[in-house]
Image: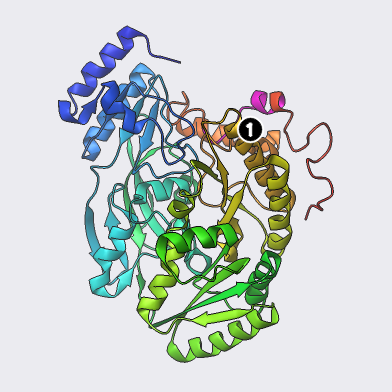
Amino acid sequence: MHLDSNTQNTLLDQLSQIVSSEYLLTTTEALTPYECDGLSAYQRLPVAVVLPDNIEQVQKIVQACSNLKVPIVARGAGTGLSGGALPHEGGIILGLSRFNKILSIDTNNLTAVVQPGVRNLAITEAARPYGLYYAPDPSSQIACSIGGNVAENAGGVHCLKYGLTVQNIQQIKIVTINGTLLTLGSETFDTPGYDLLALMTGSEGMLGIIVEIVVKLLPKPHAVKVLMASFDKVEEAGNAVADIIAEGIIPAGLEMMDKPAIHAAEAFAKANYPLDAAAILLCELDGDEDQLEEQVIVVEKTLKKAKANNIVIATSAEEQAKLWAGRKSAFPAVGRLSPDYYCMDGTIPRKQIAHVLQKISEFSDHHGLLVANVFHAGDGNLHPLILYDANKEGELKTAERFGADILELCVEVGGTITGEHGVGHEKIDQMCVQFSPAELTQFFAVKSAFDPDSLLNPGKAIPTLHRCAELGAMHVHNGELPHPEIPRF
C-alpha cells in the first residue's frame, strides 16, 4: 500500500518542520540502506527515513504520522534477523541511531540509564572501569543497539545463566502512537499494576517507540574457566548438554557448533578448533575460584562420560578469548561458504537436541541444501544456517521451506519458533502453527489497546486468522501434524 501524493506531500512538509533536512531522507539513494535489516532476503523502500535526536522530536513525528494514518517502523542498528525492521512501502522508518548516549551509571544500584541507539557492547565498555558489565551479549553486540535488543528480547552466549534482555532491564520510557510519553517498570525491583515492561520487551516495535532504558549491571565474576570439548558424533554433543545441566551446574555459557560451522569459524578466526570433530561444545563457568575448581572437575567428568574425545581447558584470558572468537564470528564465517544463508532461530527442550539435529540433517538431504548449526545449546536455542544461492531460481523458496520445517519441528517437540530473533516478517506463517485462533485473537486485542489503527510496524509478528486459514496451518496440516512420528510433550 502506497501513500497518495497529497498525504505524502503533507507528511514530508510536517516532518521537515521537526528535523533538519540532513535528517529527513527521501531520495532512493538515501533510502536504500534502510530497505532491509540483517535478513536481506526481503527488501522494501519506505516513503522516508526520519532521524530524530530527542524525545520531543519523536513525539511530534509520531503525532504527525498518527494524524495522517501513516505507518511507522522503528529501527535501531538494523542488525535484526527476522525482518522486524523491514520498511512499510506506505510508511516511514523512524531511525533511533542518534539516540546514542549513556546518560548515567549508578554503581550503588547497579544500573545504567541509556538511550536506545547505544550499542550493546558500549554499555559494558562504559561500566568496565567500575568492575561491572551488562550480561546479555548477542553475537552482534559490537553493532546491535540496546533498543533493538529490548524490542526483540535478545539473548546471547551468557543468557543461559543470566537471562534474556527481559531479565536484565528495569525500566523503559516509550512514546505511544498518540505521542504520549510513558514510563514502564521502576527503578526499584518491583512495581504495582500490570507488568507492562515485560509486555513491551519482545513486542517488536508494535506497541510503542522505546526512547530510554534502565539496564541492570552485574559485578564482573571473580574467576572464569572456559572448556572446549570435541565429539565424534553430533548426537553425543547434544546429549552432553543435557547431562551437564542435570548435574546441577548452570554454566555462564554453553555453546555448540557442528562440523561445517567449525571449519568455517576456524578458517575465519583461527581459534584452534579441531577440524576432525563432528561437533564441539564451548562451556564457560564463572564464580569464585574454589567453586569453579569443583565445577570444572564435575563438567570434565560429565563430558568424558558423554564420549568427548578431547577436552581443552583455556589457561589464560587470551586463550579464553580465542576460543570464544570462533563462536562469536561464526555467522560471518559461514557467510564465506555460500553466496547466501538463511539463519533460523528456534528453541527446543534440551533433551530434544540430539533428535532435532538428526531431523535437521534429514531435512537437509530432502531439500538438497547444506546447513551449518551454531546455537546456544544450554537453553536449546538453535541457529541452523541454511546455505543457498539467491541467484539460482527457486533456492530462496527452498531455503524458506527448509526453515519452516525446522521451526514447525521445534513446536512439535515442545519448543517455540523463536528464541531471540523475534517473529518479524520471516516467521509470521509459523505463528499459525504455534498458536491457536483464540490465542492470536488475544494478541490482536493487546495490539489494538496500544495501537488501534495498527500503524506501528504493521503486518509483523501476528498473522491474521484469515492468513492462517489460507495457509491451512493452524496447528495441523490437513488434519495431521507435519511430522506425526515425533511425540508431543
**Is residue 464 inside the magenta stretch?**
yes
Name the residue beneath numbered marker 1. Answer: 441
Q: Nearer the viewer, residue 371 or 174?
A: 371
Which residue is outermost to the bottom?
290
59 vs 89, left or right, is left
Residue 393 in which image quadrant: top right
Q: Secondary structure at mark 1?
A: helix
Task: Please say whether residue 187 is visible from this viewpoint.
Answer: no
Q: Nearer the viewer, residue 457 or 329?
A: 329
Residue drawn at (46%, 40%) of the image: 204
Q: Amino acid at mark 1?
A: Thr
Residue 131 in which image quadrant: bottom left
Residue 394 in which image quadrant: top right
192 vs 374, left or right, is left
**Is residue 106 inside the magenta stretch?**
no
5 vs 367, left or right, is left
**Residue 413 pos. (x, y %):** 74, 53
Task: Report crowding for label 1: few under 14, some 14 to 19, many 20 or more residues within 10 A (C-alpha).
Answer: some
Span shown in magenta: 460-469
Q: Quadrant of the C terminus?
A: bottom right
**Residue 324 pos. (x, y %):** 43, 68
**Residue 10 pos. (x, y %):** 26, 13
